Image (cartoon, coloured by chain):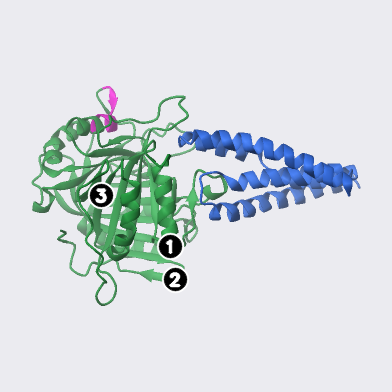
Chain colours: A green, B blue
Amino acid sequence: MTDGLKLTVYHGEHERAGSELLCDALNRIYERHALPTAILLRGVEGFGLRHTLHTQRLLTLSEDLPVVSIAVGARDAIEELLPEVSELVGKGLVTVERAQLLTRDLGAPELDEHLHEETKLTVYCGRAERAGRAPAYRAVVELLHRHGVSGATAFLGLDGLVHGRRERARFFSRNDDVPLMVVSVGDGRTLAKLLPEIAEMLEEPVATLERVTVCKRDGARLWQPPPATPAAGEGPAVWEKVMVYAGEQARHEGHPLYVQLVRRLREAGAAGATSLRGIWGYSGDHAPRGDRFLSVQRQVPVATIVIDTPERMARWWPIVDELTDEAGLVTAELVPAFRATGPAGSLGALRPAGGWRLDVK
Amino acid sequence: MTAALLAVGVLLLGGTGAVARFVFDSLVERRNASEFPFGTFAINVSGSLVLGGLTGASLASSTLLLAGTALLGSFTTFSTWMFETQRLAEDGELPLAALNVGLSVLAGLAAAAAGYALGAAL
């Protein structure tokens, strides 16, 4: 187990870095630095600092969809490539989060003391890896569900690193080896106990553990963000990331929850939101599910990520709270280092003021 | 007008229609606060109205080819209409999907008829 960092870049699919696409340039850097894992995800809906809506629901607006490029590595490795990434990313949001990194033999890790409560476990593998007769990601989700973990979602990547190899999706290909990740949220001790079993299901397991706060589960309020306090001095030292996991079939007043959430946040003036569609998963009580062959209505899970200052997040919280009155799993995390670049310039820095160790209430 | 000149005209006006659709649709959809794809709906209905008007005004056949087939043909869109209906159904918005088909057909027919009457009266 290593002290790791998770680097995430949120940007438009068409964003370029010199002569190539930004997402390609980023993955080339991750490959060159031999990171254990990296995954590029394309969002289905979202907006950024420019407040322009991008959605795959409408043909014209599906141009330049939001993408999320995630890279995970040991702290030194990520710190080393950070200046390069920082220079490359023009418009977009870069965040660095702390994560315990587990590679190869996941073992039964000794959790950081702060990981004992609610924890986010992310397992990275290849799409076609199998555990017995079932796809590995389904076996992992099934295992988590059986042990009462609050939610788990498998996301399919377009590009990234699997076992250190660059694997990207191509048009004429079975795309068996593209990266995939399973994000789950639950009790830290339960997740730690399951890790050896998960390790057996995967060829070369890579996983991260991060601290989260579970705010809501299936409409029940478990935690409420503290009232907004104005930031002292030169702006906020940390940002907050709220994630809402809800199935495609989750509704608020008869409409898809994630569509409503992105719309309301955009109308309210939030800094940005991105919805990602998973391929398999569950949140709360229902059994894991995904799309069925020849079924028009989709059943896949959707996760919506909102990142903003804690003060502003407290303003958006009533929206999140209202929309998740019946369904959804809502989590909050602190983002210790970030840089957001929009039309009005840049905000934040990629080096945390108080080091990478953060104590959260 | 020679066939070659007409082909060039179709090429240019066809491109113009497509760009106009893209711009118009973006403008409408960025202001649209509902799930209903108003952009494509407005494009198809307004296109039907203008095409009705052009045929009603019994224009020269080459003018009709340029304005109707090329400009309005690329401005209006059947495939996007169907695609966005499928996306609504995928999201479980079945009443809206049905409304998108039904309302577009009714409003489109009415617009074409009204356009034709207007064109003929001019």
Q: Amino acid at mark 3?
A: Thr
Circle 2 Cα neighbour tier, 10 Å, few/some/many (<14 / 14–19 / ≥20) = few
Side (left or right) of B100 relative to A207: right
Residue B103 percent coordinates (x, y): 63, 37
Q: Is residue A240 visible?
A: yes
Q: CA distance from mark 2 to mark 1?
A: 9 Å
Q: Residue at x 41, y 51 (%)?
A: A262
- The residue labelled by disc 1 is A49
Instruction: Point out the residue furthest to the top here.
Output: A133
**Between disc 2 and disc 1, whose residue precedes?**
1
Residue A1 percent coordinates (x, y): 13, 48
Circle 3 Cα neighbour tier, 10 Å, few/some/many (<14 / 14–19 / ≥20) = many
Which region is colored magenta? A133-140
- Does residue B30 belong to the magenta stretch? no
Q: Is residue B3 visible?
A: no
- The residue labelled by disc 3 is A331
Q: Quadrant of residue A219?
A: top left
- Give the position of the C terminus of chain A as an image quadrant: bottom left
